[in-house]
């Protein structure tokens, strides 16, 4: 059985630098946030959606990255953490615009990836979600 985990959300300068170096169409307008305090969300229930709130689409993700600061590279429904019967978690990217990485490896669309304590999930231009035990940031 897996230990209780929390998602600790923060900004990752190295990930941002890597994304900007790819020179995507919006790269020149994306700025790394000068202040982005870490915050934590305990993982619970059957699923934890990662994304940005959208009233028009009726989306209210459990891990809401709407901001501030708002990472413009995060999709409204970017990824989903799914609880497994044994207490562990998997991550699925349902087709985000900018992709998802786990520990630096790209996640294929709709292919579940096991995740655990210490794993780093990168979404958007600079957002990192680190899985940690309990509610400890």
Image: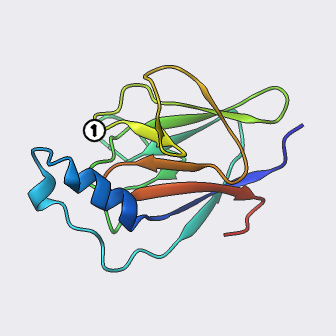
Q: Between residues 47 and 81, which one lies in front from this camera angle?
A: 81
For image coordinates 82% across by 35% down, the residue present is: 87
Horizontal arrangement in the rendering, residue 28 relative to residue 71 (left or right): left
90 lies above or below 3: above
98 lies above or below 42: above
In the displayed orientation, state which residue is furthest to the right: 1
Q: Quadrant of residue 133?
A: bottom right
Q: Between residues 119 and 91, which one lies in front from this camera angle?
A: 119
Q: Measured from the top left, where is residue 30 in percent x and y?
A: 18, 60
62 lies above or below 29: above
For image coordinates 9% across by 59% down, the residue present is: 28
Any part of residue 126 in sight? no
Horizontal arrangement in the rendering, residue 30 relative to residue 89 (left or right): left
Q: Which residue in the structure is indicated by mark 1?
A: 56
Q: Measured from the top left, where is residue 68 in percent x and y?
A: 34, 68
Q: Quadrant of residue 106?
A: top left
For image coordinates 32% across by 43% down, the residue present is: 55
């Amino acid at each position: 059985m897996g230990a209780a985990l929390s998602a600790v959300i923060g900004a990752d300068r190295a990930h941002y630098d890597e994304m900007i170096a790819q020179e995507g169409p919006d790269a020149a307008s994306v700025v790394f946030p000068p202040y982005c305090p870490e915050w934590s969300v305990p993982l619970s229930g059957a699923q934890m959606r990662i994304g940005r709130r959208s009233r028009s689409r009726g989306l209210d993700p459990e891990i809401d990255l709407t901001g501030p600061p708002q990472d413009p590279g995060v999709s409204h429904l970017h990824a989903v953490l799914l609880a497994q019967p044994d207490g562990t978690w998997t991550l699925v990217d349902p087709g985000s615009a900018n992709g998802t990485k786990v520990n630096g490896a790209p996640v294929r669309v709709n292919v579940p990836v096991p995740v655990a304590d210490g794993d780093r999930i990168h979404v958007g231009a600079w957002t990192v979600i680190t899985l940690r035990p309990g509610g400890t940031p």
